[in-house]
Amino acid sequence: MKSSRTRTVKGRTVQGKASPSPASGLRKLMVYAPIALELLMLLRRSQKARTQKAGRGKYIKARKRDRALDFMLGQAQRRMKGRR
């Protein structure tokens, strides 16, 4: 196993470390994105059920913010289904 290099910069010892490649960041994003999407969908579904129980009817129009969030989650879910 290779030992890491150390160097002194203005009196401080700094260990040299290879910076992660941009591809590894994208790979992490592609791994965690479906998980985060599923969690957001579960949270949104539970929030919808809670508002219906609180007296808002089934046929009352949702707020603009809620419609926008539902649209974004739906689009993301559709696009991620093709990559499974």
Image (spheres, grey):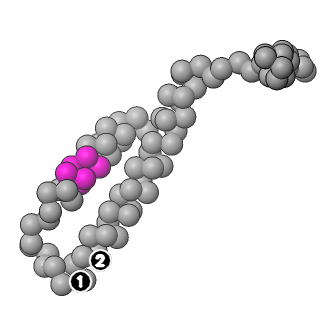
Q: Residues within 10 Å of mark 2 (few under 14, many from 20)?
A: few
| Left/right of residue 6 with respect to residue 75 in the rendered view | right
Residue 19, given in percent of the width and then of the height, sits at 65, 20
- Magenta region, main secondary structure: helix
Rendered view: 26 above or below 51? above
Judge by depth and name the residue closer to the eye, 38 or 47.
47
Q: Residue at x 28, y 75 (%)?
A: 49
Q: Which residue is mark 2?
A: 50
Specify the quadrant that holds the N terminus: top right
Q: Residue at x 79, y 17 (%)?
A: 10
Q: Is residue 3 magenta?
A: no
Q: Residue at x 14, y 65 (%)?
A: 62
Amino acid type for the residue under numbered disc 2: Arg
Residue 15, given in percent of the width and then of the height, sits at 81, 22
| Left/right of residue 13 with respect to residue 38 in the rendered view | right
Range of the magenta residues?
Answer: 68-74
Is the Cβ of the residue at disc 2 closer than 8 Å to that at disc 1?
Answer: yes
Q: Which residue is mark 1?
A: 54
Q: Secondary structure at mark 2?
A: helix
Amino acid type for the residue under numbered disc 1: Ala
Label annotation for residue 40? none
Q: Quadrant of residue 12?
A: top right
Residue 31 is at least partly visible in this image:
yes
Residue 74 is at least partly visible in this image:
no
Specify the quadrant that holds the C terminus: top left
Residue 65, given in percent of the width and then of the height, sits at 19, 56
Q: Residues within 10 Å of mark 1 (few under 14, many from 20)?
A: few
